Image (cartoon, rainbow, N blue to C red):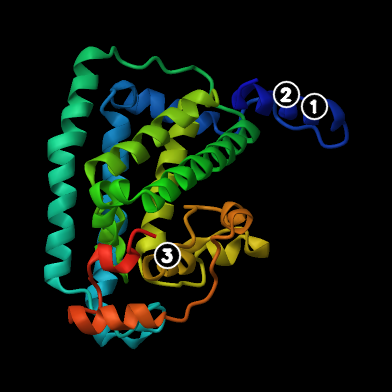
Amino acid sequence: MSVERLGNVLSGAWHGGNATWPLHTRPLLQPVWDYLQRHHEGTLRSPLFPALLSIFTYLLLVLFYTVLDLLAPTWPSIRRYQIHPERTVTWQNIGATLALTTYNHLLYIFPAAVAQWLWRPPVPLPPEAPSLTAFLLGIVGCVVLFDFQYYLWHVLHHRISWLYSTFHAIHHQYRQPFSLVTQYLSAWELFSVGLWTTVDPVLLGCHCLTGWAFMIFNVWVSAEDHCGYDFPWALHRLVPFGLWGGVQRHDIHHLQPGTNFAPFFTHWDWLAGTACVSTTKPPRAETEEDESGDSTKASGQRADNGA
């Protein structure tokens, strides 16, 4: 049973058993969906739309965080939320990360999106929006599935030296990440993440609106995990019982790369014994910082040593 059908079943059961407070049978998201179809149907049906949506969301988020990085040295009200207040993100850091992101998108992402646009017909849009239950269940299902997929991918690319040095070490050149490090990746890692983000909603039978929402959520969480700021509204502070990893744990992963592999939840790391909640910088990291002379960037091979 797809997530969409499961959501409809649960919604129907609620309607059937809720005689005291009857709910509208029309999906709550229908007005939004009607507006999008009426005014933007051509854009939504284009095979280019998911890629453009992802890129636009990413650029918007990193623009926000990069402005904070540039203001933080002279604004104590911003610096107080930095995980590493001694860190300064330089224009050199910004240029290097942005250059690789641009290179990957121009050489791999855009050609793949254009090829899909040429070879694949426009996507048909369903007339009805998903129920709110199906919409939320779909996002949760995609998050759980992606979390498992990337955990396995991440562990393998740390445990197997060839995979690490060939595909993942570049991301660990930055031990104290900032938002633009989110997509400071090899083309293979960028492709893997993009594939799961696109395919998982299809595998779970989600409405296309749900798939796009999951895509935005995934980009947002990834940028937040690398932003270097522990804000009061960060997801790990909102999700109870320590179930969500968040920026603190992923920052630890860049300092201690043998820990905290999961992108979202914490249960896989706890079960596998790879969880780490300590924010104390290990002596090894301090040595690397002295050797590199750069408090933000250091050799990924030294930082992980094939862990």
Name the kind of residue labelled 2 in the image. Val
Instruction: Write down the residue under mark 1.
Output: 13
Quarter residue 7 falls in:
top right
Tag 1–tag 2 contact (CB < 8 Å): yes
Would you say residue 78 is visible in this rendering?
no
The residue lying at 62 percent from left, 36 percent from top is 137
Q: Residues within 10 Å of mark 3 (few under 14, many from 20)?
A: many
Q: Secondary structure at mark 1?
A: helix
Judged from the image, the secondary structure of the residue bearing numbered disc 2 is: helix
Q: For the residues carrying marks 3 and 1, which lies nearer the camera in this image? A: 3
Residue 86 visible (yes or no): yes
Give me the residue at 41% from left, 80% from top: 281
Q: Tag 3 or tag 2, which sits nearer the N-term?
A: 2
Q: Quadrant of the N terminus?
A: top right
Sooner in the amino-acid sequence: mark 3 or mark 1: 1
- Cα gap from disc 2 to disc 3, whole angstroms: 40 Å
* Vertical placement of residue 73 versus 168, above or below: below
The three-letter amino acid code for the residue at tag 3 is His
Residue marked by disc 2: 9
Q: For residue 153, which quarter of the picture?
A: top left
In this orientation, which residue lies closer to the viewer: 86 or 65? 86
* Left-right relation of 221 to 142: left
Cα gap from disc 1 to disc 2, whole angstroms:
6 Å
Q: Nearer the viewer, residue 280 or 41?
A: 280
Residue bearing the label numbered 3: 253
Give the image location of residue 154, x and y in percent. 42, 49
